[in-house]
Image (cartoon, helix red, strand yellow):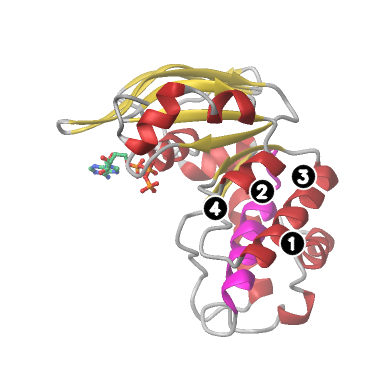
């Protein structure tokens, strides 16, 4: 369903992505890991149309992805969250979801919004000011809700579980699994917590300095000497 072929992204002299090639089947959940600055968010930006890659080709649902434009990618079925929750100010939780739906899906469908609120445990908060009235987990849930409101087939989550306490993280991980099953989603998950990755993702891709250095099951990847070296910086590992 998603294929990247030799994708590179340069920012001036910085090569944030170097010839990244991988493909995903419909329904797969892929964990995307790598040390800070490895290129994970840049990869999301390239797939979601925030950035046009310097080189390479992207294909989604059998069609080439053209010039970057995030609304166009959303309408093609690609939804994503941002690392820092970005609720729209002076709007309620429900209004935030409605704006996201209109932007990304080109329509408003109150029943889908009700369902998203319910799945993410936000129904009781739907009329609260989204920028000021939500706890951290709820802010994260709203960020996921906005991505779901665009009615994606591919959902990309950028450290959506980051900063949460272990028990909350586990519970939120289960919520994400319910969401995935409900909508039959293909997912890419950026996450630093190894236990969460193992629970959610049967397959893991590792980036280091913009290069894809491993692609396999969590056990394969976490035992890979190159991956261990990329985290420890220890050339003897
Ligand atoms: N807009 C930009 N302009 C210049 N350099 C950038 C830009 N965006 C990212 N970079 C650089 O590209 C590299 C990859 O950054 P990116 O944010 O994609 O990494 P990451 O793996 O998501 O890191 P983190 O885990 O810290 O979020 C870094 O060296 C970063 O400084």
How far across and down, in percent of the image, does residue 22 sit?
53, 18
Residue at the spot 64% in from the left edge and 72% down from the top edge: 138
Q: Which residue is mark 3?
A: 180
Nearer-N-terminus badge (1/3): 1
Cβ at disc 4 under 8 Å from ligand 1: no
Kindly identify which residue carries mark 4: 81
Report the Cα–Cα distance between label 1 and label 3.
14 Å
Residue density around tag 1, few if under 14, some if 14–19, many if 20 or more, within 10 Å: few
Instruction: Report which residue position mark 2 lands on.
Output: 105
Residue 98 appears in the picture as rendered: no
Q: How many marks?
A: 4
Q: Disc 4 to disc 1, how far (Cα)?
A: 19 Å
Nearer to the camera, 206 or 134: 206
Above/below status of 223 relative to 184 = above
User: Is 184 on the left or on the right of 69, as rendered?
Assistant: right
How far separated are the C-alphas under marks 4 and 2? 16 Å
Q: Secondary structure at mark 4?
A: loop
**Callout 2: SS:** helix
Query: Front-most of 192 and 187?
Result: 192
Which residues fall within the magenta stretch? 135-155
- x and y, in percent, of residue 30 in the image: 62, 33
Indicate which label's residue lies in the foreground, 4 or 2: 4
**Which comes sooner in the sequence, label 4 or label 1?**
4
Who's the residue at 63% across and 66% down the image?
142
């Amino acid at each position: 369903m998603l294929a990247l072929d030799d994708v590179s992204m340069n920012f001036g002299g910085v090569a944030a992505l170097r010839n990244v090639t991988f493909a995903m089947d419909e329904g797969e959940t892929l964990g995307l890991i790598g040390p800070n600055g490895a290129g994970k968010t840049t990869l999301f930006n390239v797939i979601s149309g925030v950035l046009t890659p310097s080189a390479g080709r992207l294909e989604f649902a059998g069609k080439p992805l053209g010039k970057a434009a995030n609304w166009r990618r959303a309408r093609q079925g690609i939804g994503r969250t941002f690392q820092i929750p970005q609720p729209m100010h002076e709007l309620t939780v429900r209004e935030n979801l409605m704006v996201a739906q209109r932007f990304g899906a080109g329509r408003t469908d109150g029943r889908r919004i009700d369902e998203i609120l319910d799945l993410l445990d936000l129904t009781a908060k739907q009329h609260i000011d989204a920028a000021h009235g939500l706890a951290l987990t709820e802010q994260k849930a709203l960020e996921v809700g906005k991505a779901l409101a665009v009615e994606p087939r591919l959902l990309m989550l950028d450290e959506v579980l980051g900063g949460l306490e272990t028990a909350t993280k586990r519970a939120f991980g289960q919520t994400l699994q319910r969401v995935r099953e409900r909508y039959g989603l293909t997912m890419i998950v950026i996450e630093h917590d190894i236990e969460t990755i193992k629970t959610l993702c049967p397959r893991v891709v590792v980036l280091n300095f913009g290069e894809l250095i491993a692609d396999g099951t969590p056990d394969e990847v976490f035992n890979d000497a190159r991956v261990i070296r990329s985290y420890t910086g220890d050339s003897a590992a």
